[in-house]
Amino acid sequence: MNPGQATRRVDKARANRYRMRAAALGLFTERGYAATSMQAVAAAAGMAVQTLYFTFGTKRALLSEILDIAVAGDEEPVPTLERPGVLAAIDDPDPEHQLRAQARLAREIYERVAPVLQVVSSAASADPEIAELWETNNAQRATVMERLITALAAKGPLREGVDPAMAIDIALALQSPEMYHYLTKRRGWSPSRWEHWTADALISQLLPSREG
């Protein structure tokens, strides 16, 4: 096989993988995770079901990959804490700028991942494997937030009465997927409005008053 053929084969495999993920997300969102079979996903993607199983192995693995890519925004195997936007927020010397960057990054992620998280959270109550996936996602968010708040606390004092542990909890609550979903889907806020409100709330709850 010459280099050109190898490249075309890789590109075709990547395109097929994308088609299968897109078909799965569409069906998971429309029908629910439990009601969607691998056969249905394969049919929607125009692929043989054997190809779907060969590519992903299980339906849970398929959903997990959809979630991971939605969070990251691409297929590169770079952890969240090593992503340029997160590193820039951590390194920014201005606490307010860091918190506004956090809100912006959260908005960018939720615009991509909110439909997937709804699938996962809805399926978690009835499927132990998906419940584990949901808990893993929550634990990963907590790890990222702990690193961000540790960096924030190193830049200056937090609001009186707020220690780093409490700051982590407050930030996780304000930037939670549940809060994003409630305000943008149930109350009709735009993602931009959510971002600015969240940034202002983080600043007022975590940093000393400018008048103090």
Image (cartoon, rainbow, N blue to C red):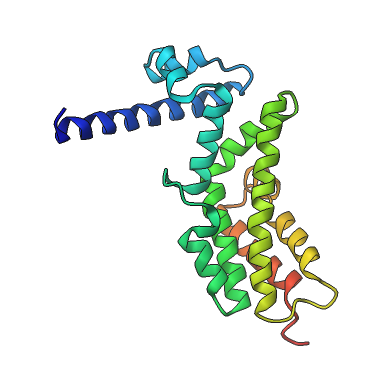
Nearer to us in this view, 60 or 100? 60
**Residue 152, quarter of the rendered image:** bottom right
Residue at 59 percent of width and 68 percent of height: 100
Quadrant the C terminus occupies = bottom right
Residue at 52 percent of width and 28 percent of height: 62
Residue at 70 percent of width and 45 percent of height: 178
Q: Residue 77: x and y, percent?
A: 45, 46
Q: Is residue 22 left or right of residue 35?
A: left
Residue at 65 percent of width and 51 percent of height: 141
**Residue 150, quarter of the rendered image:** bottom right
Residue lying farthest bottom? 211
Q: Residue 98: x and y, percent?
A: 59, 71
* Location of residue 182 with respect to 82 vertically, above or below: above
Nearer to us in this view, 82 or 48? 82
In this rendering, the count of numbered labels is 0
Q: Residue 211: x and y, percent?
A: 75, 87
Q: Residue 23: x and y, percent?
A: 45, 25
Quadrant the N terminus occupies = top left
Q: Is residue 72 left or right of residue 48?
A: right
* Location of residue 145 with respect to 118 vertically, above or below: below
* Location of residue 205 with respect to 188 vertically, above or below: below
Residue lying farthest right? 161
